[in-house]
Image (spheres, rainbow, N blue to C red):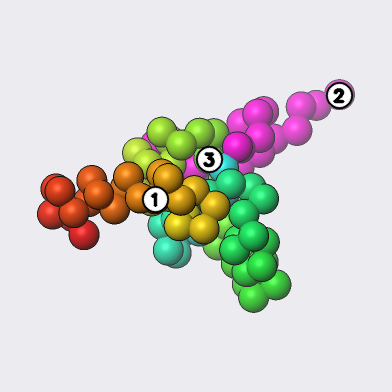
């Protein structure tokens, strides 16, 4: 029996195959990542978001790939990202 393959995004922003599923989802157009059960992401699936959805092994990988935390499902992480971005002049 062959292992299931999952398409994940690596820290370089490139897609790769993994035998382990992702723990976070993301929007490739908006460069946002969040929890797989995020109400905002789930609500956007019928509007075409599924075509832009990507997956990450973990938060460090999503950040390294240039994505920011979701303001809906990851409020604390998003707040920290905003503070860091303001402090470093990236926002």
What kind of secondary structure does the magenta stretch mostly adopt?
loop
**Relative depth, front residue between 85 and 63:** 85
| Residue assigned mark 2 | 1
Work out how far the residue at label 1 is from the one at label 2, CA to CA, in angstroms: 41 Å
Mark 2 element type? loop
In this rendering, the label closer to the viewer, 1 or 2: 1
Q: Decide: few, some or many residues near mark 2? Use Cα within 10 Å; few <14, some 14-19, many ≥20.
A: few
* Stretch in magenta: 1-23
Location of residue 42 (image quadrant)? bottom right
Q: At 70% across and 72% down in the image, what residue appears?
A: 46
Q: At 23% across and 46% down in the image, what residue appears?
A: 84
- Against 46, is 91 above or below? above
Mark 3 and mark 1 residues within 8 Å of each other at the beta carbon: no
Work out how far the residue at label 2 is from the one at label 3, CA to CA, in angstroms: 25 Å
| Residue assigned mark 1 | 78
Among numbered discs 3 and 1, the one appearing first in the sequence: 3
Mark 1 element type? helix
**Relative depth, front residue between 36 and 1:** 36
In this rendering, the label closer to the viewer, 2 or 3: 3
Location of residue 31 (image quadrant)? bottom left
**Relative depth, front residue between 82 and 41:** 82
Q: At 65% across and 29% down in the image, what residue appears?
A: 20
């Amino acid at each position: 029996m062959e292992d299931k393959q999952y398409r994940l995004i690596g820290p370089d922003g490139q897609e790769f195959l993994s035998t382990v599923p992702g723990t976070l989802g993301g929007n490739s157009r908006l460069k946002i990542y969040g929890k797989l059960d995020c109400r905002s992401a789930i609500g956007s699936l019928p509007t075409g978001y599924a075509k832009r959805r990507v997956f990450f092994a973990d938060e460090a990988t999503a950040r390294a790939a240039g994505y920011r935390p979701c303001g809906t499902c990851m409020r604390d992480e998003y707040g920290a990202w905003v503070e860091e971005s303001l402090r470093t002049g990236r926002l």
